[in-house]
Amino acid sequence: MSEIMLKSVYDLLDKNYFIPSYQRGYRWGKRQIWDLLEDLYSFAFDKSKKDGSFYCLQPIVVRKCDYDTKTANGLQSELDNNEWYEVIDGQQRLTSIYLILKYLIDTDNHDLYNDYGKHLFRLSYQTHCADTNYIANPSVPSNSSPNAYYMTEGYKNISEWFSAIPETKNIPQVKTIRSRFIELLTNTRDQSDKIGYVQVIWYETGDPDPIKTFTRLNIGKIPLKNAELIKALFLQKRDNSEISNIQQIQIAKEWDQIEAALQNKRIWAFLNKDLPDTPAHIEFIFDVIVSIEKDRLGEEEYFKIHGLQPNENIPKQRKEKTELGERKFADKYGTDEYASFRFFSARFENIDRAVMEAEWDTVREYYETFAEWYNNPLWYHYIGFLIYCGKPITEIYKLYKDKTKAEFAAGLIDAIKKELGVYLIVSGDGESKDIESEKGDPIIYASKTKDKLKQLLVLYNIEYIIQKNKDAESGYILFPFDLFKSEKWDIEHVDSFTTNPLTEAGQQKEWLRTALDDLKEYGIVYSETEKISDGEATKIDSFLEDPDSTVTFNEIKLIVSKLSGEYLPTEEVKKDIKNTIGNLTLLNADINRGYGNSIFPSKKKQITQKDAEGRFIPICTKNVFLKNFIGVNNTSISWGETDMKQYRKNIVDVLDKFLNK
């Protein structure tokens, strides 16, 4: 059984540490040692830190040595009743702390036992090297082994850093700095003052195979994660009672069940804006709990300052509350990658089984909440959309907490409405409908509204599915957030546009041949149709066959547009109509960029092929190219102005409840 806790460096004194031969020995160079000393210096002289502040080193993973290990390696010490700890991970940090303390003791003639009641901890390396003097006297340079060289060099690098203080820090009294360092490294949490103290995450494993643990942590440099550390908190023994054992087994079983559920790609994509590559997905729940704690601390601090609760609808108040919460949390638990673990560790000090059970109930409650969201089709879609837009899951949880199902659904719709911030504009005939931003700008294909367009089109696909589900006789269709978030998406013009013209002659000819072949499938042969003149047909022949042709690609595109029925007389008209939402749809970036401004029949053919191959094509994108909208000319091979108008009307009708009137 593993044991985990936070220990100050002072707690590491008076102990014995054995570094086994499966580790490569001490190898920190000048850069790593100076970085650590700089960090300690910055912390020690940080005037803004409060009482009880700490600097935290990364985990040290150890295992108590058994009798056979001590006997086989001749481990003998007068410290700690000859109890030894095999260091599985973290020996570089542990040895560096040893060398810093040794330098401070040697330089200022400190007597740790008389001054602080403890001896410097002892190190023993399983190097089978006759020379071990370098461990007790690292101030004496040694080349007797790689370990001896690096340790004595490390001591020298520490000495050089302190010697450089008058020049680098502009502080003449170097002894003052050394005194501050020795205080920092010998303070405990209970004794710390404005100076603070240094602590480590102490992870004591009961694994009988330490090499297996070492390999797991060091192949690919896989560090201990918050989830592993927190799991050890939940599963460490509090007593030897049967009830305690049953509790541990139950928590371990439920932990694995939750982890397995969150590994489901659909659930994971639903809960996350992106798809974070996190080994332990249960860590997501701990992050949410921490975020809610930060939010609580922020509200508490805001109330102390202003005498009222912050108004979440006022950006300035919301921002101040968030910053106060982050700062308060950082003061208590730090800001590094293990801050979440320290938050939970503080809750597990001197607790009994009832408290342990209550803490686990909280974790289970959050998981069950997320599972309920996922299993409710309406909530799944609206929550999934809000998370896609970047809304923190903590804010969604606030909408959910202590609400009825109807109240929660209404709250989600209102949240989406606020997120979009767009308005429905209806013309005098009551039929022509369009959407504009809260600033009064039309929602068109432009850089400043592109993100808003993408949100609208994603929500359109989602709400379309929701409305179709109401008519479904059996089963539900779900928008696949996992497939959607695993790809990049573009906003594509349904009717071809000229924003990305082809420039190479070979590409231009390939585009033309493809367009002509696709039109031929609809019975349109350029040399046999009245859609274009004989002169225009001759231009096509010249462009394809004559290497010295003076026909431009722009001329060719206009001719092909006439053939397909997409021809519009002027560029201005083209831009006004083709940049509106009625001519835009969502498409996978790689498919879209492979189009090269294809004509509508070519795009339709490619979409059909990709769909048949199993590629994810959003349902409304398929509907556009299949022309599955009332009022759209299904027989036409082009996407014209009337089609755009009817498609746009369908979008605003589907999104009606989310649009400000």
Image (cartoon, rainbow, N blue to C red):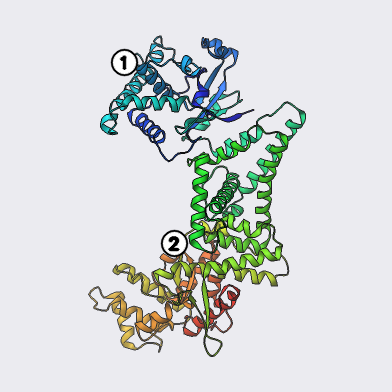
Residue at mark 2: 590
The residue under the point 58% across, 44% down is: 283
SS assignment at label 1: loop
Residue 120: x percent and y percent? 46, 17
Q: Residue at x 44, y 68 (%)?
A: 450
Instruction: Name the spot of residue 653 as percent of width and height, x first.
Output: 58, 78
| Dot 2: element | helix
Instruction: Answer with the quarter of the image where residue 36 lies.
Output: top left
Q: Classify the position of the C terminus by image quarter.
A: bottom right
Q: Position of residue 501 (x, y in %)?
A: 33, 71
Between 657 and 165, the residue placed more toward the observer is 165
Mark sitting on residue 141:
1
Q: Is residue 170 above or below residue 159?
A: below
Q: Depth check: give the residue in front, 11 or 464.
A: 11
> In the image, is residue 486 above or below residue 160?
below
Q: Quadrant of residue 127?
A: top left
Residue shown at 49% from the left, 58% from the top: 487
Tell me which amino acid carries mark 1: Pro
Rendered image: mark on residue 394:
none
Give the residue at x 49% y 55%.
320
Could you tell me if residue 619 is visible in this image? no
The three-letter amino acid code for the residue at tag 2 is: Asp
In the image, is 63 to the left or to the right of 531? right
Which numbered mark, 2 or 1, is in the foreground of this view?
A: 1
Q: How many marks?
A: 2
Of all residues, the one furthest to the right in this rendering is 242
Above-or-below relation of 152 to 275? above
- In front of the other: 491 or 600: 491
Give the quarter of the figure containing the N terminus: top right
Q: Measure the C-alpha gap from mark 2 to mark 1.
A: 61 Å
